[in-house]
């Protein structure tokens, strides 16, 4: 594990041989903005008094507004209320942040590994000591339940702790020389300024996962958080300053995503881009980085299969699949996007899984007992609706097509029977196909909504936890990432068929299998073309293992 983890640190370092001879939509502030409720106002007041509600960008250690004074609104997705206004920054602010990071690089990279390690350890301690406030901030701007949000703080902080320790272990190599009077050594050195572009679904953990190894190596960073969830990033930056991390080492800009991204790509001072987000944006970043030949690390979309075999423990499979699918309301890159269930256990699993999903409590993340919050915005809900509607419409099309074929075959069979009876001088014969085949067809040949399938009665961007049975490969649900609380169930017969279905995608990030057969677990794990595979486990992310796809 250490070797694999150090590979990420090495990706932010350049080898030196010595020889002794998003675009995301923005909410622009308007006079008609919704007023903050008393509940939200009380939370923001407490966060402000703790010094963690920062509403300015951070450039060179100074809190800064947008140069043109423009702002964007940060909304609470559970209520639609405005939490705060933050600067709508662009290219100019980003270029200044890059310059600050570049100026700070030389002093930061020249610190000893022990000194950098101490700064990171202090930052970790501050993150943990403020985990309640940071969790509240995550729930306010992202919507996930408070317990889950605090869990993210612990998870996100673990990357800083891990790399505080690994900072002291960026080892080089000694290579046997080909000539007797030569000695060959390899040193690992920081690449320079890193541009880190992070998503909204894990507003802390996606930052610490990138910034931790960069700072540990001696790199400096310009962070561009999602404009939907910038407040957590700014709070983390405040704690970094309190930890003694020098000005300019960590900078935060947010606002106009294309302008910020273009500035990071165009600058020759930015030596590496690290990005988590959509495949479409990742392709643009990779293309743009070629102009200045930057190193690029991309963690893009997923289409994770979750295979449940007949020999799986039903309770374990239901519990693990539930965690893999519905964490963060289905808004994670490693969510189980396809539940591929063997036909022998399919009906039992579908019934047990649907009952478990039905018990999931939906609501505001601050409410007691809630485990499913809202989706991040209206666009996310519309995407989920379109995927579900596609499955339903294709189900109906397949049913109608099959019914017409059955009717045609039935008519032909009737004609044959009538002709046979007339030739025998008898009258009789009824249609050989009744209602039962139609019922079987709808149940087994077309997808069906077993649970949910519509917006929640709470309104806003809440969507009912949904289970759809008998999904087919022609449906968008099986081909693209839904990024919402919808679990599509697919049937399979053989192990080979399951592997084929699972690998039939261009996204190879995470996969899950549930089986009690040890030999099968190894066979299938090695056959799956995915970077992460969970066996009888639905939560597989950890700071001590590499995270990435094929």
Image (spheres, grey):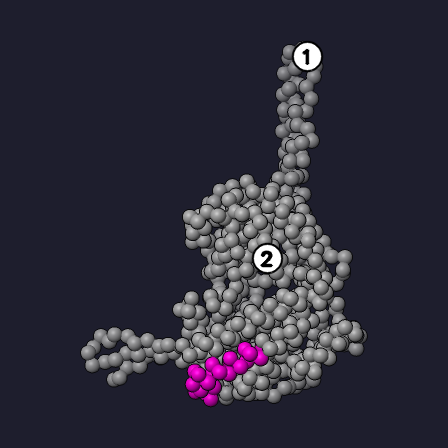
The quadrant where residue 373 appears: bottom right
Image coordinates of residue 138 in percent, x first then y, are: 65, 71
Q: Is residue 89 magenta?
A: no
Task: Residue 223: tell me if it is visible.
Answer: yes
Q: Is residue 378 above or below residue 226?
A: above
- Residue 323, disc: 2
Q: Which residues are magenta?
A: 106-127
Between 307 and 267, the one lying in front of the other is 307
Q: Residues within 10 Å of mark 1 (few under 14, many from 20)?
A: few
- Residue 426, disc: 1
Residue 420 vs residue 19: left or right? Answer: right
Image coordinates of residue 411 in percent, x first then y, are: 66, 27
Which type of secondary structure does the marked residue at label 2 adopt?
helix
Q: Residues within 10 Å of mark 2 (few under 14, many from 20)?
A: some
Task: Residue 262: tell me if it is visible.
Answer: no
- The majority secondary structure of the magenta stretch comes to helix
Q: CA distance from mark 1 to mark 2?
A: 64 Å
Picture residue at 71% right of the left edge, 67% below the top: 366
């Amino acid at each position: 594990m250490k070797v694999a983890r150090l590979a990420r640190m090495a990706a932010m370092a350049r080898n030196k041989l010595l020889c002794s001879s998003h675009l995301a939509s923005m909410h622009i502030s308007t006079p008609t903005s919704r007023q903050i409720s008393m509940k939200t106002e009380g939370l923001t007041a407490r966060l402000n008094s703790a010094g963690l509600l920062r509403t300015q960008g951070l450039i060179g250690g100074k809190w800064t507004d947008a140069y043109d004074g423009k702002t964007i609104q940060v909304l609470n997705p559970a209520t639609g209320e405005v939490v705060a206004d933050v600067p709508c920054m662009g290219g100019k602010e980003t270029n200044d942040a890059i310059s600050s990071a570049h100026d700070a690089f030389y002093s930061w990279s020249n610190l000893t590994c022990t000194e950098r390690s101490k700064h990171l350890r202090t930052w970790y301690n501050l993150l943990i000591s403020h985990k309640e406030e940071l969790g509240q901030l995550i729930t306010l701007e992202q919507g996930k339940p408070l317990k889950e949000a605090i869990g993210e703080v612990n998870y996100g902080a673990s990357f800083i702790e891990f790399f505080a320790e690994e900072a002291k272990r960026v080892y080089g190599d000694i290579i046997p020389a080909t000539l007797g009077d030569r000695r060959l050594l390899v040193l690992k050195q920081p690449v320079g300024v890193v541009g880190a572009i992070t998503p909204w679904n894990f507003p802390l953990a996606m930052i610490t996962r990138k910034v931790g190894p960069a700072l540990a190596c001696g790199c400096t960073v310009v962070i561009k958080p999602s404009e939907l969830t910038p407040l957590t990033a700014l709070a983390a930056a405040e704690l970094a300053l309190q930890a003694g991390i020098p000005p300019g080492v960590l900078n935060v800009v947010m606002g106009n995503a294309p302008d910020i991204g273009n500035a990071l790509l165009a600058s020759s001072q930015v030596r590496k881009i690290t990005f988590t987000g959509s495949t479409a944006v990742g392709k643009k970043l990779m293309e743009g980085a070629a102009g200045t030949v930057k190193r690029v690390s991309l963690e893009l979309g997923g289409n994770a299969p979750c295979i449940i075999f007949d020999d799986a423990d039903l309770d374990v499979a239901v519990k693990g699949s539930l965690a893999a699918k519905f964490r963060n309301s289905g808004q994670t890159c490693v969510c189980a996007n396809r539940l591929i269930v063997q036909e022998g256990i399919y009906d039992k699993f579908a019934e047990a899984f649907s009952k478990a999903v039905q018990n999931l409590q939906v609501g505001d993340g601050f409410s007691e007992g809630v485990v499913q919050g809202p989706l991040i915005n209206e666009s996310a809900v519309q995407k989920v609706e379109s995927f579900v509607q596609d499955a339903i419409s294709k189900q109906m099309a397949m049913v109608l097509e099959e019914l017409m074929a059955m009717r045609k075959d039935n008519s032909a069979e009737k004609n044959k029977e009538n002709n046979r009876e007339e030739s025998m001088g008898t009258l009789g014969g009824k249609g050989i196909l009744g209602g039962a085949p139609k019922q079987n067809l709808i149940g087994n040949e077309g997808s069906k909504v077993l649970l949910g399938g519509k917006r929640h009665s709470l309104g806003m961007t809440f969507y009912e936890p949904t289970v759809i049975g008998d999904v087919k490969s022609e449906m968008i649900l099986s081909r693209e990432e839904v990024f919402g609380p919808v679990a599509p169930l697919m049937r399979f017969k053989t192990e080979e068929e399951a592997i084929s279905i699972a690998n039939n995608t261009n996204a190879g990030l995470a996969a899950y299998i549930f089986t009690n057969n040890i030999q099968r677990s190894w066979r299938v794990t090695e056959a799956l073309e995915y970077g992460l595979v969970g066996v009888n486990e639905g939560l597989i992310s950890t700071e001590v293992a590499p995270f990435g796809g094929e």
